[in-house]
Image: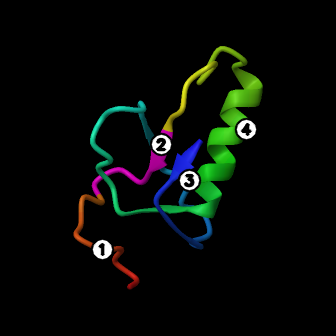
Amino acid sequence: MRMTWLYNQDGNTNYETQKKGQPLIGAQVTRQAVSQYVIDMIKNPKLGVRESNAVVEPNTNFAKPSFY
């Protein structure tokens, strides 16, 4: 699992994954969203099997994180 810049925001569990080899689009993701991705992988054992997925927040294709 690969991640972009991490930040905290309660209640924000929005994430999308991008496969290895694709350009990484997304400047940030919440720690809560990464936790949600892990929970989703536990609930669905076939999710992300033998993949190196990037976890990013949707619609954050910025030059740098919004909090930077």
* Residue at horizontal 41 percent and vertical 30 percent from the top: 19
- The residue pinned by badge 2 equals 54
Q: Residue 2: x percent and y percent?
A: 54, 47
Q: Which mark is residue 64?
A: 1
Of tags 4 and 2, the one toward the viewer is 2
* Residue at horizontal 47 percent and vertical 42 percent from the top: 54
* Residue at horizontal 54 percent and vertical 32 percent from the top: 52
Where disc 2 sits, the SS reads: strand
Q: Give the residues in magenta.
A: 54-59
- CA–CA distance in space, label 4 to label 2: 16 Å
- The residue pinned by badge 3 equals 13
Q: Are marks 2 and 3 in contact (CB under 8 Å)?
A: no
- The residue pinned by badge 4 equals 39
Residue 2 lies, with reference to residue 10, above or below; the image says above
**Of the residues shown, which amino acid type is indicated by label 4?**
Ile
- CA–CA distance in space, label 4 to label 3: 11 Å
Mark 1 or mark 2, earlier in chain:
2
**Of the residues shown, which amino acid type is indicated by label 1?**
Lys
Q: Are marks 4 and 3 in contact (CB under 8 Å)?
A: no
Of residues 20 and 68, the one nearer the viewer is 20
Residue 34 lies, with reference to residue 16, above or below; the image says below
**Of the residues shown, which amino acid type is indicated by label 3?**
Thr
